[in-house]
Image (spheres, rainbow, N blue to C red):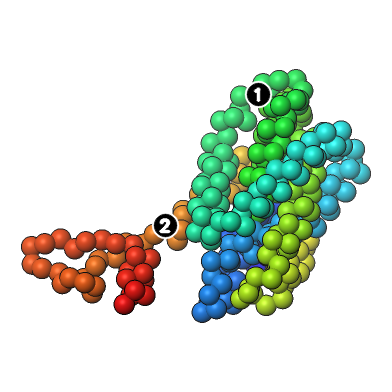
Amino acid sequence: MLLSGLLAGLVAGMFGIGGGFVVVPALAAVLSIFTAGTGADDRIMHVAIGTSLATIIVTSIRSVHAHARRGAVDFDILKTWAPYIIGGVVIGILLAKFMDGRTLKLIFGFGVLLMGLHFIFPFLARRGALADSMPTGPLRTGLGSFIGGFCALLGIGGGTPAVLLMTLSGIPIHRAVATAAGFGTLIAIPGAIGAILVGWGEEGLPPFSLGYVNLIGLVAITTMSVITAPIGVALAHNLDAARLKRVFGIYLVLTSTVMLYFAMPKLVPAVSGDEPLQAGKPATLVTASDTMERKTER
């Protein structure tokens, strides 16, 4: 957890994102150790996502404050988009409650894969502005709700899609990055509160958890991220930004690949079940869950 906090703060400072891409998989791996054999393994992704959103509250508010002192945050955009962002977050959290851990891993894996490919091949960012102002009306409602819901399901602050949206709408990149930190706050606060509420009363969760927010993970990650965030900012100003983004994009692709691998059903030969394996006859492949169901029926 401490290491993931250090890395999360580093990438947050370097790329202007909340660090959820780093925090969620790290938390999922570490928290699995605490719940092994408790029957709560299916809720680990819920806790990882909820805790990630809680950590983003601290990092995003700190970032907004720093950017606001430079006059770079467009609070008018935040005010007009807030209802739709928050509404999308509420929908995302409620949907997550009715999803199992495998489904959330698949969503996170595919979502992170898309973001990773964007960092490696930023084809949309190269197109330049498509409009001279932010979307309004039904388009704003739809995009705001989608960003809020999508980020709530992934446990991220929305920095990447928010910056992309604003730059395509003619907002200068520095102002877009600064305002995107505010998007993170709008997503993280209702997301973390919702994660606590929908997870309240769940049995077998990791120690010191409030619903789907783990307090140990929250303290460890936020403490470390505060230390490394300024280092990330300094690196961003002294290293080749395009190369850094490609390296981070490769990391995201690798992370998503691992997450998708563990989310996919495993196939095992049905040689120890109802019928023996005969010479010249190929083994029938079944999922591991099917094998478990057969054993339970017996």
Callout 2: SS: loop
| Residue closer to the observer: 35 or 201 | 201
Q: Is residue 131 visible?
A: yes
Give the residue drawn at x 58%, y 66%.
Answer: 43
Q: Position of residue 217 (x, y in %)?
A: 70, 69
**Front-lying residue, 41 or 298:** 298
Q: Residues within 10 Å of mark 1 (few under 14, many from 20)?
A: few
Residue found 79% across the figure and 49% down from its top: 185
Residue 74 in view of the camera: no
Q: Is residue 229 above or below residue 123?
A: below
At x 46% / y 55%, what residue is drawn? 260
Horizontal arrangement in the rendering, residue 183 relative to residue 127 (left or right): right
Q: Amino acid at mark 1?
A: Gly
Q: Number of marks in the image?
A: 2
Which residue sits at x=39%, y=59%? 265
> In the rendered view, would you say 181 is above or below 25?
above
User: Which label is found at residue 110?
Assistant: none
Q: Secondary structure at mark 1?
A: loop
> In front here: 262 or 139?
139
Q: Quadrant of the C terminus?
A: bottom left
Give the residue at mark 2. Answer: 264
Residue 110 appears left or right of 64 = left
Mark 1 highlights which residue?
128
Point out residue 131 in the picture as x, y percentages from the top left corner: 71, 20
Q: Amino acid at mark 2?
A: Met
